[in-house]
Image (tube, rainbow, N blue to C red):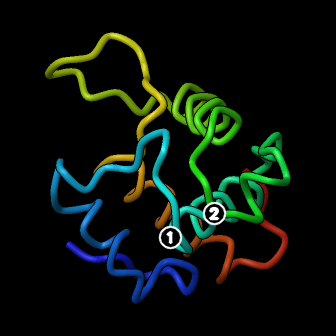
């Protein structure tokens, strides 16, 4: 598996997130890869991320809340051990974000 959207392609931390449980993105994570996820969320309409979190590329409480809203809206749940979505960006979430970014990048005017 690999990420193909223009936004995520080449981001090693996001590639790792898609492959390894230990690389999942959680509250406290920081870096450019967090800002890429925040950008994707905003492009999809999940825009209630505090400006300071975005500027710093910090996975804080507002980023976590928007991840949870996104996962709830898309019903991203690992039924092997969950009954409800969580606020972690893991394999299923990063893959779904990547697919939606590919669509946004290649289909003008599409809205989710």
Query: Residue 33 — which label?
Result: 1
Q: Which residue is mark 2?
A: 57
- Res. 12 mark: none
Residue 81 percent coordinates (x, y): 17, 18
Q: Residues within 10 Å of mark 1 (few under 14, many from 20)?
A: many
Residues 93 and 59: in front is 59
- Quarter of the image for residue 95 reads bottom left
**Direction from residue 93 to residue 78 in the image, left or right:** left
Q: Which secondary structure, mark 2?
A: loop
Q: Locate residue 58, reporting x and y percent.
A: 61, 54
Relative vertical location of residue 71 with respect to residue 4 in this rendering, above or below: above
On screen, residue 94 above or below 108: above
**Mark 2: few, some, or many residues within 10 Å (few <14, many ≥20)?**
many
| Quadrant of the drawing holding the N terminus | bottom left
> Is label 2 in contact with label 1 (beta carbons under 8 Å)?
yes
Residue at coordinates 76% horizontally, 56% vertically from top-left?
A: 42
Taking the spot 79% from the left edge, 48% from the top edge, the residue there is 45
Q: Position of residue 101 (x, y in %)?
A: 59, 69
| In front: label 2 or label 1 | 2
Q: CA distance from mark 2 to mark 1?
A: 7 Å
Residue at left offset 67%, top offset 53%: 41
Task: Depth check: give the residue in front, 58 or 104.
Answer: 58
Q: Residue furthest top?
A: 83
Q: Nearer the N terminus, badge 2 or badge 1?
A: 1
Q: Position of residue 48 (x, y in %)?
A: 82, 40
Residue at x 49%, y 39% (from the top left corner): 27
């Amino acid at each position: 598996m690999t990420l193909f959207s223009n936004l995520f392609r080449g981001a090693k931390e996001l590639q790792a997130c898609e492959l390894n449980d230990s690389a999942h993105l959680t509250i406290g994570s920081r870096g450019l890869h967090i800002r890429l996820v925040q950008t994707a969320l905003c492009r999809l309409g999940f825009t209630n991320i505090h400006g300071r979190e975005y500027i710093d590329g910090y996975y804080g409480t507002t980023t976590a809340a928007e991840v949870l809203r996104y996962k709830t809206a898309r019903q991203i749940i690992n039924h092997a051990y969950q009954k409800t979505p969580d606020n972690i960006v893991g394999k299923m979430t990063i893959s779904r974000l990547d697919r939606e970014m590919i669509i946004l990048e290649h289909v003008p005017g599409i809205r989710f």
